[in-house]
Amino acid sequence: MKMKKKVIVAMSGGVDSSTTAALLKEQGYDVSGITMQLWDYAEEESGCCSLSDVLDARMAANQIGIEHTVVDYKEDFQKYVVKDFIDKYYCGQTPNPCIMCNEHMKFNFLLNKSLEMGADFLATGHYAKISKDSEGVFFLEKGQDKFKDQSYFLFTLSQKELSRLMFPLGEYTKNQVREISEGFNLSVANKKDSQDVCFIAKDYRGFIEKNLPNFNSKEGSIKSLDGQILGKHSGIHNFTIGQRKKLGINSPVAMYVVSINFKNNDVIVGNKEDLYSKVLFANNLNWSVNPKDLIEKKVDAKIRYRSPESSASIRFIDGRLHVLFDQPQRSITPGQAIVFYSNDKVLGGGWIDEVLR
């Protein structure tokens, strides 16, 4: 008798991961659920990763009829996600904690834990697909629902990780998933999606000041592009590229943050046209293809989750990835990811390190 493949599903307590577990059980897999405890509930201020989410995951597992386990990764979450979030803002960058959480928590710690528990695969509720070519190379691809597609957040996945992952929802739209969830009579069928930074319910600035050891807000200057001092600020962590409100300066025209100089502790502002640039450098790269094969060719590049892809060319300068867009892009932001596509296929990606104007 052929043994069923064992799949452990990362259950967050939401409709997507719960439906993933129900679908896989219906398809005949040996399914169990696992939930990460990432936060100290006694100090809870998060929008998700909460005690109620863990309880929702447990209830969904009971409704589906599968075992459910909770694993404690609070210290790792602080080390790899929260610390990175705080450090990047403190240095004038704008972090993407969802990508860091995927890379370290889900697809390192949780995947390895699942394999230790005897699983053949770890499944999640991400809207993305995994394919394999004739040479056995795995590729991450966009999900069927192009509005919900989450491939941008998954660009760090390695070949080894892709070979052990399942994304069943990649074939569905969000509306279809909710309908399927209702068909399974899951209590989370109409639960709202989490928004923004999952571990911060309110203002990220206050969170940084509260959680950064020996935090000392350092006053600096707000300057125009030509170096004129327009005002003072109480810390560069209060600003991000493209910000227009709460700049603390008086101006007859709308002004925007166009760059942040960590070394000089300056916030540089300009008009809307000054937000656009065509060149960036990226580091900490991950590829599914040989990047040398992409040089002198056009690729589609995405500089933030909700931005459309834009045609660009790449090359390497002194070991750094240089990206030149065909058309100027608005508010390219250090600390965010840039992900490269060919149609629906993810070619690779990295972290935006510097923007040239």
Image (cartoon, helix red, strand yellow):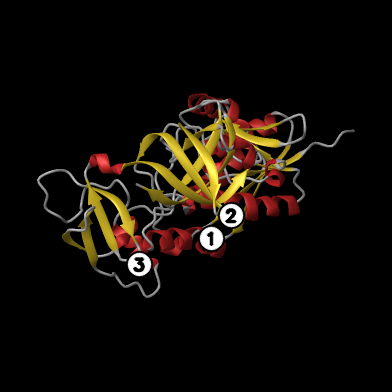
Q: Under tag 1, what secondary structure?
A: helix
Secondary structure, mark 2, is helix
Above/below status of 206 relative to 131: below
Q: Residues within 10 Å of mark 1 (few under 14, many from 20)?
A: some
Residue 313 position in % (x across, y down): 51, 36
Choose top left, top right, bottom left or bottom right for residue 86.
bottom left
Task: Name the residue at the right extreme.
Answer: 1
Q: Earlier in the sequence, mark 2 or mark 3?
A: 2
First along the sequence among labels 1 and 3: 1
CB-based contact (under 8 Å), mark 1 and mark 2: yes
Q: Residue at x 43, y 43 (%)?
A: 194
Q: CA distance from mark 1 to mark 3?
A: 18 Å
In the rendered view, does 118 fall on the left or right side of 255? right
Q: Are marks 2 and 3 in contact (CB under 8 Å)?
A: no
4 or 172, which is in the foreground? 172
Viewer-nearest residue: 28 or 214: 214
Residue located beneath label 1 in the image: 80
The amino acid marked with disc number 1 is Tyr
Q: Can you tell which mark lies on residue 104?
A: 2
Give the residue pinned by disc 3.
210
Furthest residue toward left: 252
Who is closer to the viewer here, 268 or 118? 268
